[in-house]
Amino acid sequence: MKTAEGLPKTAEGGASLIETLVAFGLTVAVSAFALSLFTFHQRLARAQLDDSFLQQAQRTAHRELRRVLRGAGRGGIARPSPGQEPRPELAAFVEKEVASGHPVGAVAAAEGTDVLVVRGVMNGPLYWVGNSAFDPASGRGWVEVRAETPGGVPQPLSMLQDAGEAGDDALLLVAAAGAAHAVAQITDVEASGRGPTRMLKVHFHGDPSRGPIAAAYAAMSRGGVWPGDGMMPVDRVGVLEEWRFYIRPGDPGSGQRSQLAKARFYPGTEIAWRRRKSSLVQPIADDIVDLDVTIVRTADGRRFTANLVSTARAGEPAAAALRVERTASSAVRLRNLR
């Protein structure tokens, strides 16, 4: 049908092709903007969540590091002999920026990170000794420890008994008034009595020719030799521990994330505690990718401080925009190293 002017008549209320394309384009643009906004907020929420997780991981890591470092040297293993310099390296030292494959027993630390080594009586008490005996010729001796001191102070004996039953643990012997110390290999334990009268008789051997463990312990005795001068009578004893803190590298194939872990060794040796691989891999916190430790000595040589810096990272390794990284630092005064 034609109008009076001779032009074709269009359907009333309809839309032309151009109008439809414009409307479609606007819809696509608005949808794309909404999708990008949603993606942005999703990434922001994920980044905030990752940052919260990393912050908690670093709190956990620094709390454990500070706790163990406060016990570094507890029992007096860093104390010098008269006229000698202190031996702080017996209680705490750092293997800086280790190479690829650096061994921590049967496992390896991440390349370029630090490994912190700490020794001391950290997770158990220093027990007061009731009686003791030592034969310098054979290197053998024993100490008696009761569940309650003569003054009525309880002494939980479980850690000392476990160490004695397993054998090979390091017994730190401290002479009266802390004037000297020696480290010996626990060989046996005898238990008797009940309740407050319960007593342990712990046998030890200090002959360094018995093997690598005994030799390592003898080298940590005062002056670097067993048994050390002025060793008797023994005043207190404790179980000497060695812990190493390291970064365990991640493994994308297995989904294992980088983490701060700790390993326990027989002190001064490369032998895992209880000779178990599980002693070498005790996770502390995930997503910790770097550990930097510096032990600073004051000018007078009497005070030491450990400065700790950790780096935590989460997110997609291949995309820097999707990674979240945090750095945390803290300091610990090493009170037992002077």
Image: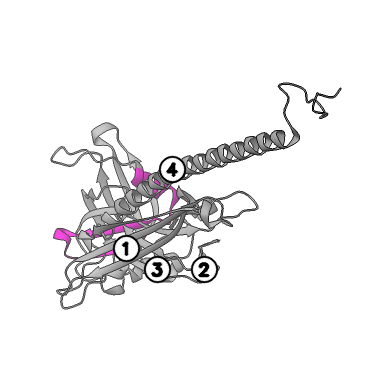
Task: Say if the magenta span includes residue 77.
Answer: no
**Residue 36 seen in the current view:** yes
Quadrant containing the N terminus in the rendered view: top right
Which residue matches tag 1? 183
Which residue matches tag 2? 102
Closer-to-camera residue (245/199): 245
- Residue 327 higher or lower than 7, as above or below: below
Closer-to-camera residue (173/287): 287
Q: Badge 4: how crowded within 10 Å, few (<14), some, or many (20+)?
A: few
Label whose residue precedes the other's in the sequence (3 or 1): 1
Residue 337 on image: x %, y %: 22, 64
Q: Single out the mark in the foreground, 3 or 4.
A: 4
Q: Single out the mark in the foreground, 4 or 1.
A: 4
Which residue matches tag 4? 48
Quarter location, residue 245: bottom left
Disc 1 marks a residue whose amino acid type is Val
Tell me the magenta residue range.
159-185
**SS at mark 4?**
helix
Identify which residue is drawn at 47% across, 70% down.
98
**SS at mark 1?**
strand
Quadrant containing the C terminus in the rendered view: bottom left
- Residue 216 higher or lower than 197, as above or below: below
Which residue matches tag 3? 216
Determine the CA span between mark 2 and mark 3: 21 Å
Identify which residue is drawn at 20% across, 59% down.
335
